């Protein structure tokens, strides 16, 4: 029921997902039946083995304060969807709604997996030669070193499932790779990441110019840095797209050249298109929660549904639990920083 484009776009996404991914079985739409039933009829969708509807009378809006909304709107579509996961009636939840409410609701209702103190939001971002996973993209701005260690492990497992990379290269985001560069958080986290050894393929600290080069597959940072990075990248993409469009239309000769280069522009758009992966999972919970962008269209939501299905089947959380437990043993000794 959330998202900038409303439930009609979600219903359209479900129709695409059911058509393109026959293995999806079932999808549960959570929301006000009075709103959803006409939309389903218009889309030619019928309730049955692959599609059910769970009624929820309230909606958490983008303007609602997260914790207040969770207390006052007990019958919201978001909380009811999370509860379906908590009760084992669904394997994961996808939402385009209020990010703060989804993260708070997911954490309070599902709790974190054993050994994990704070969940991290993972985003898939294009880079030279492919894509990388950025974690944390905004869930935990006040991170401690052990939180970043957990992010590295969870991000590695997610990268294996989503990007198909057997041994993802992990880098710790900082302001320089020279010894001693960065703040106390980075210095201690770097020591802990080296300490956990074979659990991840850790390459060491990285700088900003490494991020979009074919250097690492998982970029680890706190949620404050990650959120700025992801929003700056999205803004930069829009900026260059607008500038390119203006410059190519500046005169007839350029317009002709643009027409002849349509294939190249189409390929570029596909490479940097955020709709390709659609959702960012909240890693480290006792259940699967994926946050799709508030402005997601049907294609982005469809991709988020596919990503949720893949994470559920790959049992990412179960596979990560043993690594988290082992890492906590290894990092339990005090770190000496000279």
Image (cartoon, grey):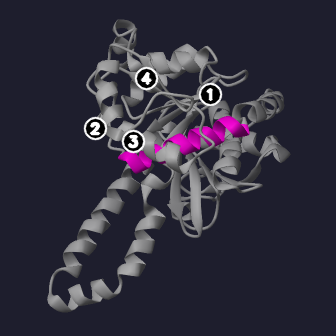
Position of 10 relative to 70 (above/below): below
Are circles 3 and 2 on residues that touch, CB within 8 Å? no
Q: How busy is the neighbourhood of tag 4: few (under 14 within 10 Å), some, or many (20 plus)?
A: many
Q: In the displayed image of the protein, which residue is found farthest to the left?
A: 251
Q: How busy is the neighbourhood of tag 1: few (under 14 within 10 Å), some, or many (20 plus)?
A: some
Q: State the mark number for residue 30.
A: 4
- Residue at x-position 16% and y-position 89%: 252
Tell me the element at label 4: strand
State how far apart marks 2 and 4 are (Cα): 17 Å
**Of labels 1 and 3, the one closer to you:** 1
Are circles 1 and 2 on residues that touch, CB within 8 Å? no
Q: Is residue 300 magenta?
A: yes
State how far apart marks 1 and 3 are (Cα): 20 Å
Q: How many marks?
A: 4
Tell me the element at label 1: loop
Q: In the displayed image of the protein, which residue is found farthest to the bottom?
A: 253
Tell me the element at label 3: loop
- Residue at x-position 28% and y-position 84%: 259
- Residue at x-position 24% and y-position 66%: 242
State how far apart marks 1 and 2 are (Cα): 25 Å
**Residue holding disc 3:** 293
Q: Please give the range of residues in magenta.
A: 297-314
The quadrant the C terminus occupies is: top right
* Side of 338 relative to 215 (left or right): right
State how far apart marks 3 and 2 are (Cα): 9 Å
- Magenta-colored segment: predominant secondary structure: helix
Tell me the element at label 2: loop
Q: State the mark number for residue 4.
A: 2
State how far apart marks 4 and 3 are (Cα): 18 Å
Near-viewer residue (84 or 264): 84
Q: Is residue 265 magenta?
A: no
Q: State the mark number for residue 130.
A: none
């Amino acid at each position: 029921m959330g998202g900038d484009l409303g439930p009609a776009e979600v219903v359209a996404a479900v129709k695409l997902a059911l058509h393109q991914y026959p293995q999806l079985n079932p999808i549960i739409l959570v929301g006000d039946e009075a709103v959803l039933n006409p939309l389903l009829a218009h889309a030619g969708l019928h309730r049955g083995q692959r599609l059910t509807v769970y009624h929820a009378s309230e909606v958490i809006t983008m303007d609602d304060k997260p914790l207040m909304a969770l207390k006052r709107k007990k019958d919201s579509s978001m909380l009811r969807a999370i509860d379906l996961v908590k009760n084992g009636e669904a394997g994961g939840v996808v939402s385009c709604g209020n990010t703060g409410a989804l993260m708070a609701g997911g954490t309070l209702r599902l709790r974190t997996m054993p050994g994990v103190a704070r969940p991290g939001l993972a985003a898939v971002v294009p880079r030279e030669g492919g894509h990388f996973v950025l974690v944390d993209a905004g869930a935990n701005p006040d991170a401690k070193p052990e939180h970043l260690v957990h992010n590295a492990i969870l991000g590695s497992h997610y990268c294996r499932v989503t990007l198909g990379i057997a041994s993802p290269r992990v880098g710790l985001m900082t302001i320089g790779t020279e010894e001693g560069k960065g703040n106390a958080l980075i210095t201690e986290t770097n020591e802990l990441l080296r300490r956990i050894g074979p659990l991840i393929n850790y390459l060491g600290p990285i700088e900003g110019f490494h991020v979009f080069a074919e250097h690492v597959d998982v970029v680890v940072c706190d949620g404050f840095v990650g959120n700025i990075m992801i929003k700056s990248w999205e803004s930069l993409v829009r900026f260059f797209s607008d500038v390119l469009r203006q410059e190519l239309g500046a005169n007839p000769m350029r317009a002709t050249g643009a027409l002849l280069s349509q294939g190249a522009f189409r390929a570029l758009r596909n490479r940097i298109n955020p709709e390709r992966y659609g959702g960012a999972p909240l890693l480290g919970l006792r259940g699967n929660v994926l946050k799709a962008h508030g402005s997601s269209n049907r294609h982005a939501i469809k991709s988020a549904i596919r990503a949720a299905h893949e994470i559920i089947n790959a049992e990412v959380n179960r596979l990560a639990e043993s690594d988290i437990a082992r890492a906590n043993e290894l990092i339990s000794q005090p770190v000496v920083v000279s």
